Image: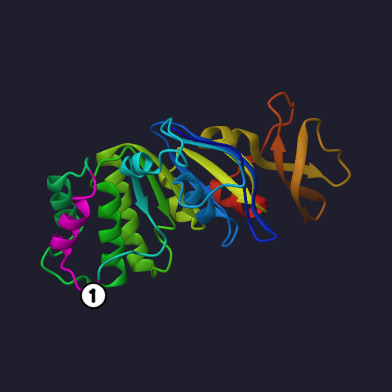
Amino acid sequence: MIEAKGLTKRFGKKLVLDGIDCKVENGSVTLLLGRNGVGKTTLFHLLQGMVPADGGTVRMGGRDPFAEPEKVKASLGWLPEQDALYEGWRVGAFLDHVGAFYPTWDPAEARRLTAKFGLDPKAKISTLNRGARRKLSLILAMAHKAGLFLLDEPLSGLDPLFREEILLSLIEAIQEGGGTFLIASHFAEELETLATHALILKGGRVVAQGSVDGLKAAYGELRLKAGEPVPPGVEVLKETSLGDERLLAVKKSPDSPARLANALSLTELFKVLA
């Protein structure tokens, strides 16, 4: 499980994370949604103990990454937004080299994923296209069977064809390998089918979190006639006029009598909240 309480981070006078409280349940695939620059990568760096927090606590599989950074890193699969690859190396040799640093590295799994993703072990990394490089980085994250995985913008910078290839590779890796995943992205629509849970960031804070089913039960659309009052227990997030009707995007409390016309998808919820 991944858990943060009151997590705060400043860079100079800029408050990037403002008291983040979040929990990623064991075995879940949680989307961390937020616009560019909202603090998703900073949160990932704090979760790994790569930079110090200014306040709050973090636990990664029960460990404090600031007190035990090496143990946390050894138990973590990490896909950074920018690929960190050795250009002059060949794919197979590079994987063997990286694997030597991880006690849980599985060479057979690395070879299996290399073949499954269609990569040539003898190919020089410098010759790989953007999609192949992203697949190689995904193998680095997955092949030591860490149990906890942080994937930062896995589809970022890819054209539609490569995004589809990486998405299919990611789906296969999750289905076959299991584990607990926190995936940061602003591509909510393409990753929504993967998710069991979601976290949405805005202004350095968590503005929504929970299971996909729970979020869909709480957030939705409500149609009201012009002048009709909003039912109790309903918070209006966005309003659109439709002639003599109003279409409201709302958050409904569990005890509200309001009946939602439609649940909001994660993509729609992201657009409304972020």
Q: Is residue 235 left or right of residue 78?
A: right
Instruction: Indicate how the structure is coloured in the image.
Output: rainbow
List x then y, in percent, for residue 22: 56, 37
Q: Nearer the viewer, residue 55 or 182?
A: 55
Q: Nearer the viewer, residue 57 or 82?
A: 57
Residue type, label 1? Ser
Outermost residue, right direction?
Answer: 227
- Count of numbered marks: 1
Residue 172 shows up from this direction: no
As helix, strand or loop, the secondary structure at mark 1 comes to helix
List x then y, in percent, for residue 41: 50, 56
List x then y, in percent, for residue 241: 79, 55
Residue 2 shows up from this direction: yes
Q: Is residue 164 left or right of residue 5?
A: left
The quadrant of the rendering that contains the N terminus is: top left
- The image shows residue 57, relative to residue 80, as above or below, that is above
Is 246 magenta? The answer is no
Residue in the image at 35% along x and 45% along y: 73
Q: Nearer the viewer, residue 180 or 80?
A: 80
Q: Residues within 10 Å of mark 1 (few under 14, many from 20)?
A: some
Residue in the image at 58% along x and 62% along y: 37
List x then y, in percent, for residue 152: 43, 55
Q: Nearer the viewer, residue 131 or 224?
A: 131
Rendering quarter of residue 229: top right
- The image shows residue 87, relative to residue 245, as above or below, that is below
- The image shows residue 139, relative to residue 211, as above or below, that is below
State the residue position of label 1.
Answer: 126
Q: Is residue 60 left or right of residue 249?
A: left
Provide the residue span drawn in magenta.
87-102
